[in-house]
Amino acid sequence: MQGLRDRKKAATRQAISDVATRLFEARGFEAVTVEEVAAAAGVARKTVFNYFATKEELFFDREDALLDEIVRRLLSRPAGSSPTAAVAGGLLNGPVLFAESCSWGDLKGDLYDGLLRFSACERASPTLRAHRLVITHSWRAPVAAAAGGSQLWAALFLAVLELRQDTLADALAQRRTPATVKRRVQATARAGLDAIEQAVE
C-alpha cells in the first residue's frame, strides 16, 4: 500500500504528464518544449526530469505499468494455461489495453475523443512513432521470460498488440460508432491470438 509521500509523487507525475499530453495533442509533439510543459504544469524544468527521463516518456507515461501488468498476468497464469489465454482479456475486454476499470460500454464522449486525440498525436509525430518501436523492442525480453522463455511467442504477441492498436486508431480516425470500433478491434485481436496459438502452442 502506498504511503502519503508516494501518493503525492504519483499524483504530481500524473499531473505533469496530463498537462504535457494536452499540449502535445493541441500543437504536436515536436512543437512543444519541456520548458513549456514545466511552465504549464507550474513546476521547474528540473522537476519534469525528476519524474521523466525523456520528453517521450511524458507522452508514453503508462507503458511501464502496462508492461508490468502483462508480465504479472503471464506469471500468475494457472498451471496448464497458455500464455495467450492469460493475456487475451487485456486485448479484448475494453478499448484501453489491460484496463479492468474501462469497458467497451465506456467508449463514448470524453473517452472516445481522448483516445482519438492521443492516437492521432502519436501518428502525426515521427519521434513518437520511432519511440514506439523502441518500447516494443525493449519489451520482448521480459515478455518472453514471463511467457516461459519463448522469444517467438513474445514477438508474435507484440505484433498482435501493435496491430490491435492500429485497428483501434484507424476506426477512431474514421469516426466509426463505438459498436463498430469494438467489433473491428475484437475481430483483429482474436484472429491474432488464434494465429499465435496455432503457430506456437
Image: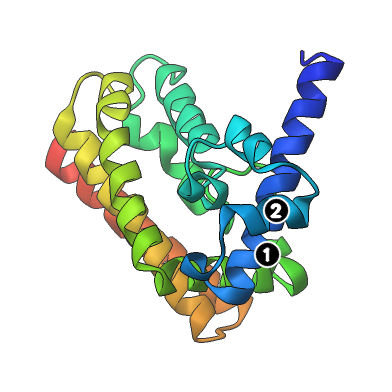
Q: Which mark is residue 157?
A: none
- Picture layout, residue 114 above or below residue 144: below
Q: Left or right of 193: which side holds 62?
A: right
Task: Identify the residue at the far right of this view.
Answer: 4
Q: Amino acid at mark 2?
A: Asp
Q: Secondary structure at mark 2?
A: helix
Q: Find the distance from the CA under tag 1 to the CA under tag 2.
A: 6 Å
Nearer-the-camera pick, 141 or 157: 141
The answer to which image quadrant residue 11 occupies is top right
- Residues at discs 1 and 2 in contact (Cβ within 8 Å): yes
Callout 1: 10 Å neighbours few (<14), some, many (20+)?
some
Picture residue at 76% right of the left edge, 19% below the top: 6
Q: Left or right of 147: which side holds 60?
A: right
Residue underneath mark 1: 22
Give the image location of residue 60, x and y in percent.
Answer: 51, 48
- Picture layout, residue 201 above or below residue 185: above
Nearer-the-camera pick, 201 or 126: 126
Picture residue at 56% right of the left edge, 59% below the top: 33
Give the image location of residue 149, x and y in percent.
Answer: 20, 20
The answer to which image quadrant residue 189 occupies is bottom left
Give the image location of residue 192, x and y in percent.
Answer: 28, 55
Q: Is residue 37 visible?
A: yes
Q: Amino acid at mark 1?
A: Arg
For the N terminus, give its image quadrant: top right
Picture residue at 76% right of the left edge, 74% below the top: 109
Q: Which mark is residue 18?
A: 2
The answer to which image quadrant residue 50 occupies is top right
Give the image location of residue 111, x and y in percent.
Answer: 70, 65
For the C terminus, give its image quadrant: top left
